[in-house]
């Protein structure tokens, strides 16, 4: 039995599955990751600040217009569509599996593919709020605004509901994610280097039967896994469908 058949059998045996995803699952959808040669952190900017500095809370507060110039151009991909991997995990749910997605991504592609339980550790580009009155706005409102988007009711600055550097993760989302990982039979880690904390540390709570990593590069967790695929997730999914 090859690795793909083994993975397929593991999935068939398990009912409660958590899929823990990072940027790598969305690269085939045309969204760059962070650390590769073409990733966001290696993008040239029009500012003296690095990409990591630009997507920080302090930069947002002190250089809001420059933040939005970078954010709209490099972080938001409203035309991106779910790929075969997003769709596969959503379809598992339709086939009777209890599938929970815990994601570090902010692109909303898991929901677009049809996954109904998605815990977004770092927030989402699809929710934005007025810092003054709390009014909510969709992605189109932000993308269509010239420069900094302001609330159409009170004029306050609109902020994306994403977790920037220097900001804390939502405690409720953390709790739900850890509980899901602790309670599942199988944990499938996809497209993440497991270098971003505290999110990467959540996988240590797994107590179930099988843990699988699908990531192009090695991770620090590989030695603890039942199966490791150092390849594009779309290739893995194509071989188990």
Image (cartoon, rainbow, N blue to C red):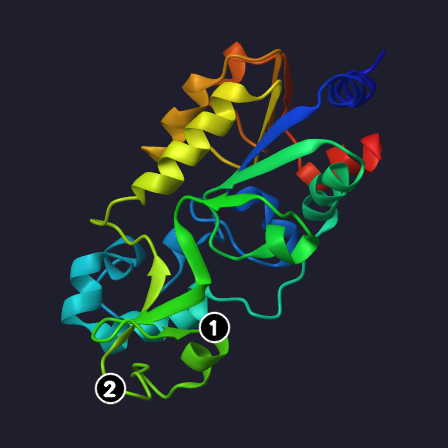
Where in the figure is residue 213, as x and y percent of width and height? 59, 25
Q: For the point 74% across and 23% down, which residue is it? A: 11
Q: CA distance from mark 1 to mark 2?
A: 19 Å
**Horizontal side, residue 9 vs residue 146: left or right:** right
Say whether residue 80 is left or right of residue 196: right
Q: Is residue 91 visible?
A: yes
**Residue placed most toward the observer, 134 or 63:** 134
Q: Are marks 1 and 2 in contact (CB under 8 Å)?
A: no
Residue at image x 51%, y 11%? 224
Q: Determine whether the residue tagged by mark 1 lies in a helix, strand or loop.
A: helix
- Residue 177: percent from left, percent from top: 45, 33
- Image position of 171 with respect to 113: above or below: above
Q: Residue 25: horizontal and vertical position, in percent?
A: 60, 44
Nearer the observer: mark 1 or 2; the answer is 2
Q: Is residue 20 left or right of residue 60?
A: right
Can you tell which mark lies on residue 204? none
**Which element is circle 2 on?**
loop
Residue 195 appears in view: no
Q: Which mark is residue 154?
A: 2
Residue at the spot 78% in from the left edge and 16% down from the top edge: 6
The local crowd at label 2, few if under 14, some if 14 to 19, many if 20 or more residues have their Cα within 10 Å, is: few
Q: Is residue 37 above or below residue 211?
A: below
Query: Crowding at label 1, few (<14), some or many (≥20) Cα neighbours within 10 Å?
Result: some
- In the image: residue 218, left or right of residue 42: right
Q: Where the N terminus falls, by quadrant? A: top right
What residue lies at 84% left-to-right and 35% top-to-bottom? 241
Position of 157 relative to 238 (above/below): below
Instruction: Look at mark 1 in the image and give the residue it sits on.
Output: 139
Closest to the observer, 137 or 26 = 137
Count of marks overlaid on the render: 2
The answer to which quarter of the image holds residue 129 is bottom left
């Amino acid at each position: 039995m090859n690795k793909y058949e083994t993975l397929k059998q593991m999935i068939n045996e398990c009912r409660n599955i958590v899929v823990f995803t990072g940027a790598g699952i969305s690269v085939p959808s045309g969204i760059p990751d962070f650390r590769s040669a073409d990733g966001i952190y290696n993008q040239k900017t029009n500012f003296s600040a690095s990409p990591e500095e630009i997507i920080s809370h302090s930069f947002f507060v002190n250089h809001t217009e420059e933040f939005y110039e970078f954010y709209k151009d490099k972080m938001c991909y409203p035309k991106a569509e779910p790929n075969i991997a997003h769709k596969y995990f959503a379809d598992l749910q339709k086939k009777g599996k209890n599938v929970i997605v815990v994601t570090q991504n902010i692109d909303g592609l898991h929901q677009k593919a049809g996954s109904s339980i998605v815990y977004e550790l770092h927030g989402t580009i699809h929710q934005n709020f007025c810092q003054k009155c709390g009014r909510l706005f969709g992605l189109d409102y932000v993308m269509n605004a010239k420069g900094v988007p302001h609330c159409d009711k009170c004029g306050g600055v609109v902020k994306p509901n994403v977790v920037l550097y220097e900001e804390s993760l939502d405690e409720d989302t953390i709790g739900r994610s850890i509980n899901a990982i602790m309670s599942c039979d199988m944990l499938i880690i996809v497209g993440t280097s497991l270098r971003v904390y505290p999110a990467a540390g959540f996988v240590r709570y797994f107590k179930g039967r099988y843990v699988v990593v699908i990531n192009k590069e090695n991770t620090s967790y590989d030695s603890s896994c039942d199966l490791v695929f150092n390849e594009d997730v779309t290739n893995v999914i194509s071989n188990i469908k």
